[in-house]
Image (cartoon, rainbow, N blue to C red):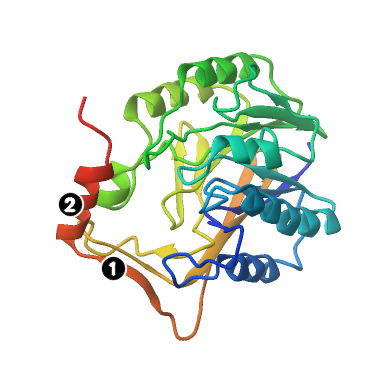
Amino acid sequence: MNTLRILHLTDTHLFGDDARHYDTVDTAAQLTAALAHVAEQTFDLVVVAGDVSEDGTIESYQRARTMMGDWARERGARTVFTMGNHDRREAFREALGGGQPDADEHALPGVDPARPVASVAESNGWRVIVLDSSVPARGYGDIEPEQLTFLRETLATPAENGTVIVMHHAPVDAQTDLLQALALDPADADEFIQIITGSDVRAVLSGHYHHPIVETINGIPVVVAAGVANIARSLDDPAEESAELAFGGAVIEIRDARTRVVPFVERHEPTPEVFRYDRDIVARIIAAAGRPAK
């Protein structure tokens, strides 16, 4: 079986101009630093698992395609992008297609540019499926029924070496109250897990939480990479939320029956705090932006 090496990044939050995230973070510089950190490594795939853009402009997605695409091509790799809650479907699709712009991708059928951005592509016996867990104008995630059908039908025929799924909202719980309020719909997560169990899926690559998590579900690793734009503090008071100016990602190698995940987090010296929300502010954000009770 061939080996598949993946650079897994997420939450780049790029702008189409010189604006800064939280008026502080130069996200293009953060991405440049993250790529430089692993520049001596070789990869087959370079993945950004959502929140590619912060402002949702065509220019921001073109910037992502140029920065990531040029770097990947120098290493013989191809790029994979997926929609996050900050992304905008029409602009994403115009610049990045179905999320696999360097491959012969087959997108979710349909012509409405506002529909979910999902695709499948296969090369060297490895299949990559991009799903869109974003809900327009909301922070939490869903997987719409047509995507679950698309996933089920695609996985019905195994790929030669296996399948990797890329989606922004992970099918695992968050570490903090705020992020759990902005997590993937539990019913959708359960159905997603049912579909991939017993299939040829070798890994699920996600983002959104801005800190690393690796959780195994029915033998399948779910890898949440740390954010490129900033790193959330994951083990502080879960009723609060804060992040520091740092970047991270993961290097993943799938070989034979093994999946190896090497997360990395790199802090600036000194390490400024990007934001800090106390429990009262978090409660207000949850009430305003969290998933409505059913």
Q: For marks 1 and 2, give the CA distance.
A: 13 Å
User: Which is more N-terminal, label 2 or label 1?
Assistant: 1
Residue drawn where x is 30% and y is 44% of the image: 180
Q: Is residue 241 visible?
A: yes
Label 2: which secondary element: helix
Instruction: Using the image, determine if residue 44 lies above or below residue 158.
Output: below
Q: Is residue 106 left or right of residue 264?
A: right
The answer to whether residue 252 is seen in the rendering is no
Q: Residue at label 1?
A: 276
Q: Are marks 1 and 2 in contact (CB under 8 Å)?
A: no
The residue singled out by tag 2 in the image is 283
Q: Residue furthest left?
A: 280
Left or right of 282, for residue 137:
right
Residue 148 drawn at (x, y percent): 51, 19
Quadrant occupied by the N terminus: top right
Residue at (21% x, 62% y) in the render:
237
Residue 185 x/y as whole percent: 35, 31
For label 2, count other residues whose C-alpha is less than 10 Å away and answer few (under 14), some (14-19) or many (20+).
some
Task: Write down the quadrant of residue 29 in the picture.
Answer: bottom right
Residue type (three-letter) at the residue carrying disc 2: Ala
